[in-house]
Amino acid sequence: MQTANAQQFTFTKDHDALLVKDLNSAAAFYSEILGLKEIDNAGLGPKFRWFELDNKVQIHLIKSDEAFTPHKGVHLALNVDDLDAFMKFLKEKEVPFENWPGEAGTTNTRPDGVRQIYLRDPDGYWIEVNTNTL
């Protein structure tokens, strides 16, 4: 009997699921601030709202009263084609953001040359937005 090894499998990202307290507020953030397209939630009902990035990766928002403590080290990471324009947009919308060390309204550059900022959604989840072109 042959044993499989990890190199025989190809993985791509499908979705991230986030528990949220106020589903409508979270949905407004993901659609109006991040510009994600809302998609059908496969008939799961009113406690679920699904969004899709340009590369078809999805974010599933799930209404929940569960307690959790967001941490900056555990975050979603998104690429953007124009970080400076996005930071300007966030300032116009009065959405606070910071760099990794926590300095408000500015970016930093990682050792690999990628610029990044961090912002929080209405439930406190951290989101990194960066210039990584993969």
Image (cartoon, helix red, strand yellow):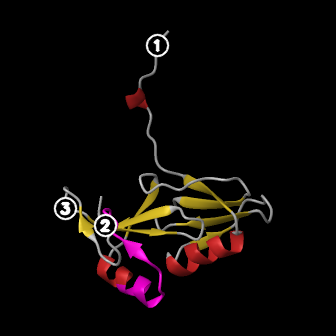
Residue at 73% across / 57% down in the picture? 64
Q: Which mark is residue 113?
A: 3
Dot 1 corresponds to which residue?
Answer: 2
State which mark lies toward you, 3 or 1.
3
Residue at 46% across / 48% down in the picture? 12
Using the image, determine if residue 31 lies above or below residue 17: below
Dot 2 corresponds to which residue?
Answer: 116
Which kind of residue does numbered mark 3 sit on?
A: Gly
State which mark lies toward you, 1 or 2.
2
Residue 82 appearing in the image: no
Left or right of 46: which side holds 39? left
Give the quarter of the image for residue 115: bottom left
Q: CA distance from mark 3 to mark 1?
A: 43 Å
Which kind of residue does numbered mark 2 sit on?
A: Gln
Q: Nearer the viewer, residue 36 or 3?
A: 36
Instruction: State which region is magenta.
Output: 88-102
- Could you classify mark 1 by the number of other residues whose Cα lies within 10 Å: few (under 14), some (14-19), or many (20 or more)? few
Residue 38 appearing in the image: yes
Query: Which label's residue is closer to the chain start, 3 or 1?
Result: 1
Circles 2 and 3 in contact, beta carbons < 8 Å:
no
Q: Position of residue 33 (x, y in %)?
A: 51, 79
Q: Position of residue 51 (x, y in %)?
A: 60, 67
Residue at 31% across / 67% down in the picture? 116
Circles 3 and 1 in contact, beta carbons < 8 Å:
no
Q: Which mark is residue 66?
A: none
> Which residue of the protein is positioned furthest toward the top in this rendering?
1
Residue at 41% across / 86% down in the picture? 91
- Could you classify mark 2 by the number of other residues whose Cα lies within 10 Å: few (under 14), some (14-19), or many (20 or more)? many
